[in-house]
Image (tube, rainbow, N blue to C red):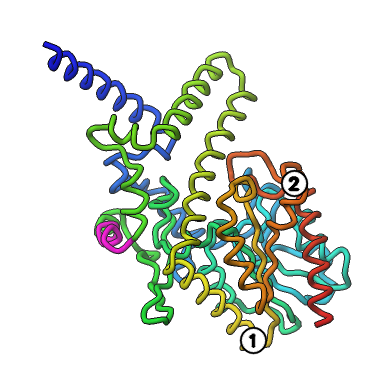
Amino acid sequence: MIIFQIIISFLVIEILLQIFIRSYKRNFKWFINDDDEFPKFDEAKLKNFLSKSFDYKLGWKQKLNTSGFLHRNQKTDTSHNHRKLINKKKKKLIATFGDSYVFSNHMCNANTWEEQISKKNNFNVLNYGVGNYGLDQAILKYESSKIPKSIKIVIMGFVPETITRIQSRWKHYTEFGNINGFKPKFDLINGKLVLRPNPINSKITIQQMKKVIFKLRKSERFYKDKFLKYKFQFPYIFYFIRNFKFNVKISMYLIMTDLFKVFKNHKMCEKLDNIKFYLIIERNVKEAHILYKESYSKKLLTNLIEKFEKTAYKKKHLPLIIIFPQPQDINLRSSQFYEKFFNKFSKDKNILDLSFYFNKVNYNKYFLNDKYGGHLNKKGNIYVAKIIDRHLKKYFKR
């Protein structure tokens, strides 16, 4: 009788948990289950992505003349694929490549750290940054971009989490729900970098997508290391308990958000959304920090840094690498792993890790508090511009 009651209780909890996960995953993509193994692609959205944002060699590109919520008042130069300059008369001396911290997400052109440096000096800093890029994509963009002959210094900037990004060809396995995020990557074979091209092309159909995904499941490390680790499948109870602390927190915030929606408290809903996504990014960042203890990951990142430097010297540019910590990087003790890695590099390479400077101040005032990754706000861009400008002056003297 007791065994029967236990079985019935288990089944009831399992059914309720499945209903809960399936209902919330419609609007919360980070709850994944078997449906996400081969996600449904919206034909119209896929066609729009392929025609406007897709780039076979790079994965995706910054939309030209972009405006809207994510890039409010932001414009990129249609002829050169970089942000438009405020003062075009100044000499173009520095070019920057990298991810959204280089592009300066959420900032208008006048408030980027590149523009702050340009204001202080009699030269322009060109911004070629693209959101969500890994170091691999940024290097490929640098190699393929036609930049002005007047450029003397090239800055490569990225977040520490790039150590995850450079090992993936499909973002969905590391950023659940980012199903259009296909990209090339480099593998390290016998000490040499080997380029693995983008698994899709601009003419791919939804019918062909399943074959591509099936192949990626076999070759992508994060399919096993992350996607399957967090995927809900029968019994859901087991997988809920497996990541109990995280799942309880997220579930609690999802329920609370729904309650505040009933009372039309939009400010509280927005605040809870930000907390949820902060926790997700925090988990991603923690997992990235662990990779800085892994031999292959460190060697791959080292080789990519060296590739950037060789490319820069070949183009007769002076290379500078800047590490942009996310708020979660600064807040976590595990940040010591990536700080040690880049600190060793800085002895014989020109690397500026901004973590050191954010650790000395109340860093929260320099970041946006939103669900899109907590990028630098206007004050933050001014703060890092001062640090980078000082470093550049020393760099020129050398």
- Magenta stretch: give its range: 212-220
> Residue at 43% of width from left, 64% of height from top?
167
The quadrant of the picture occupied by the N terminus is top left
Tell me, yes or no, whether the highlighted magenta stretch contains residue 166. no
> Residue at 82% of width from left, 64% of height from top?
117
Q: What residue type is disc 1 on? A: Tyr
Marking on residue 366: 2
Q: What residue type is disc 2 on? A: Tyr
Q: Position of residue 383 (x, y in %)?
A: 80, 54
> Residue at 41% of width from left, 45% of height from top?
177
Q: Position of residue 385 (x, y in %)?
A: 79, 60
Callout 2: SS = helix
> Residue at 39% of width from left, 32% of height from top?
244
Crowdedness near tag 1: few (<14), some (14–19) or many (≥20) residues, C-alpha within 10 Å? few
Q: Which residue is mark 1?
A: 313
In this view of the protein, which residue sits in the foreground, 278 or 93? Answer: 278
